[in-house]
Image (spheres, coloured by chain):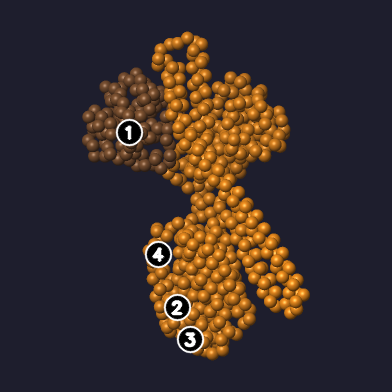
Amino acid sequence: MDFYILFSFINGTVAILFGLFVFLKNRKNITNITFFLMSLSIATWSFAYCKWLSVASTSDALFWSKMLNLGATFIPIFYLHWILSIINKINEKKWVLMFGYLLTFICAVFSFSPYYITSVALVLSFPFWPQAGPLYVIFLIFGYFGLTIYGLSLLVKEKKGADQEKIHQINYVILGSLFGFGGGATNFPLMFGVNLFPPIGQSLVIFYIIIFGLATLRYHLFEIKLILTEFLIGVMGIVITFLLFLMPDVSLKLLVSLILFLFLIFGYYLIKTIHQEMARKEEAERISQSKTEFISIASHQLRTPLAAIRGYASMLKDGDYGDFPDKAEVAVDYIYEASVRMIKLVNSLLSISRLEKGQIELKIQDVSIDDVLAECIKDIELVAEDKGLYLKYKKTKEKLPLIKGDPEKLKQSFSNIINNAVLYTPKGGVNIEAKKENENMISVKIKDTGIGMDKEDFNKLFKSFSRGKGSAELYTQGTGLGLFVAKNFVEMHGGDLMAESAGKNKGSTFTINLPIKTDLQNKQDFALTE
Amino acid sequence: MKKILIIEDEKILSEMYRFKFSKEGYEVINAMEVDEGLEIAKKEKPDLIVLDILLPKENGIYFLEKRKGIAGVEDAPVVILSNFDDKETKEKAFSLGAKEYLIKSNLNPSEVLEKINKFLK
């Protein structure tokens, strides 16, 4: 019995402390408010559970068992409200929410009547276990199981298409729900006279509130660190202060006071350090956000004059304004090429800012890798020829299967890598090979005889605005954005991009692995504009 | 002779497209802003409208909304030619009946011409 009292007391204490803590972090946020309300319900249930187990008379036990069930009645609806606020669907699901609140209200009004809890009875080693009335059955079906399973199903649906951080957050919430509601559910069979096992799940409920607390604070690594640190320091501080009063003599009191003093100093500095770390991270995020905005605006503004330079140069080249001397023709070619290069750079900047804002989506269709590679090669073979490089594409005898993907983005990924290979290869050439690696993977290898890479280059290879050391010294055309964009696009397709090089001047090999069958969703989107 | 209305506020660009399209044998009328474009469209009944998005006062999306119900303007194919390629704007433009959404800086005037020729045959 003491085991159940202890766990219920811990559950109630943790729920009220954590709930209050989350609420005080942001009193206006609906997620924090609903979490707090859910915690209050859990605390009511837990503390009433303690009291109910401690009383000696049937009438007291009946009262407290009704009180604990009143607390339990509110948990599912606040849970669902909290889930809907996390996934931003409160408005969309307002009718379900209203139904849940109505049901909860009715159950709460009748919670002290025999329709809800009929009596208490001896079950296993519990002298006064509450027995469910007809309304309680309705609460269990529609409230406890109905609302929570509905909330869980929404969470599972939300995982599709969510970013990694959100998926982590949702996984935490699902795990917490299974612990909490699963643990809590072990109390119910006894209410119907089914006593196959004791309500041991009670001890799992504590994990539920902790896991939810972490997820509520938006699964932010630093925030979790801060919350946990503040929480643990607070709890330990209370425990040491409690010990201080329990110490029998003055010398021990002094020793514990000293420990408490040192603990508080270290605790203060630890929390301060984490606060500073968070502030630095927020500042870095703010700067990154401003940079993204700047790139986006600047890119749009740059496009207009560039469109004019490119347009007029192309018309001069086409002879729209009549003939002009050969020397001038070369100059016009240079102007045109420079403007196209500049436009590509601007487009890359826009791609980066969109990638950083998570605004790029895929337009999924059946894609022939053979066709995409052939188009990429067609675009660059003249440049390779001008440099005296070979550009060979080795096809497999068997036709490659079609994959699900966005042809524009795959083309941009391959083009960026092949362009780099040609750009950074002074002699020799580039071999491209595509083959079916296994039942569900196509691999594309782009191997050059170029300037290769050393260890330092590898470290920053796929970062934006980074170019290899040698490439920066020898070539000036690279923007340092191509591989970053390529890697991001390939990963959006569920694939990966890897690089190998035996070292400086020993060439490089880039391998792109793409899954043949994926569950990529087709979203209404527009091709990138490069 | 088929008529093209270009609604574009950058004179340097509208002149460039006017020159290119005229050379192809089209009659080209330029407008600098949406209201002017609507007035000209009502009067001239163009066979195709080339529309920029970022314009002074009202934007290109407003033009697409306003042309609804105007006889001879509502049915004219509209090709968006803009450097602004925000996803929501594109979606909105297509939902309001735009036939194409072209990015000015990514295409030579000859390539723009090829695209619009499709709608003028």
What's the distance in space between the residues labelled 2 and 1, CA to CA?
63 Å
Which amino acid, mark 1?
Val
Q: Is residue A291 above or below residue A91?
A: above
What SS does tag 2 mark?
Answer: helix
- Give the mark, 2 or 4, whose residue is nearer the N terminus: 4
Identity, as a three-letter code, of the amino acid under mark 2:
Tyr
Do the CB atoms of the residues marked 1 and 4 lie less than 8 Å apart?
Answer: no
Chain letter of the residue carrying label 4: A
Q: Which chain is orange?
A: A
Residue at the image position 58 percent from the left and 70 percent from the top = A14
Label 3 belongs to which residue?
A119
Residue in view at x 48 percent, y 34 percent: A298
Q: Chain of mark 3?
A: A
Say whether residue A510 is left or right of residue B50.
Answer: right
Horizontal relation, residue B26 to residue A251: left or right: left
Which mark, by number, is residue B78? 1
The residue tagged 4 is A96
What is the distance, in whole Å, between disc 2 and disc 4 at their CAs?
Answer: 20 Å
Chain letter for the brown colouring in the rendering: B
Separation (CA) of disc 3 from disc 4: 32 Å
